[in-house]
Amino acid sequence: MDEGNTLVNALIGAVVSTVAGFFLPFAPLFGGALAGYFQGGTRSDGLRVGAISGAIALLPSLALGFLVLSVFGFIALGSGEAAGLAIGGIILLFLFVFAVLYFVGLSALGGWIGNYVKYDTDIDV
């Protein structure tokens, strides 16, 4: 592919992560690995392109999550419970942190693994 072009490789990894996410658990790991494999360079280059890929793949999930949770938030506002809104905000914060760790963390790990596979194994993609 386009070795060294970080944005193109990150976009390829993000598309793989997003599409494969409908079928495979831990899909960001696969998308990050593909991006890291295509990126080449050092292990830190693989980590960087994997993390960027995960951040890009996180955006559609955040948009979908915002859409779904805004409907539930609208319902919660109708109930008039301030404590429910506070607990919902805390849960939303934990969900956001989990999503960032899941997408960006797994993609960065995948980027490292993809770089490792490219230079230290006999596997050719």
Image (cartoon, rainbow, N blue to C red):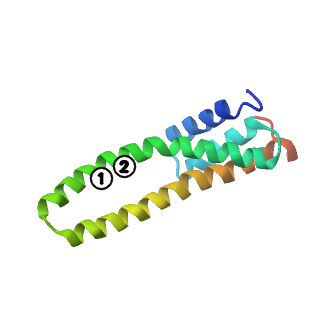
Of helix, strand and loop, which one carries label 1? helix
Q: Amino acid at mark 2?
A: Gly
Q: Which mark is residue 69?
A: 1
- Whether residue 101 sits left or right of residue 110 in the image: it is left
Front residue (pair 110, 122): 110
Q: For residue 12, what is the image quadrant?
A: top right
Front residue (pair 74, 110): 74
Q: Residues within 10 Å of mark 1 (few under 14, many from 20)?
A: some
Horizontal and vertical percent position of residue 71: 23, 50
Q: CA distance from mark 1 to mark 2?
A: 6 Å
In contact (CB < 8 Å): disc 1 and disc 2: yes
Q: Residues within 10 Å of mark 2 (few under 14, many from 20)?
A: some
Q: Amino acid at mark 1?
A: Leu
Q: Is residue 7 above or below residue 64?
A: above
Image quadrant in which the C terminus is located? top right
Front residue (pair 26, 43): 43
Q: Which mark is residue 65?
A: 2
Horizontal and vertical percent position of residue 16: 57, 37
Image quadrant in which the N terminus is located? top right
Horizontal and vertical percent position of residue 93: 41, 62
Is residue 36 shown to the viewer in this render? yes
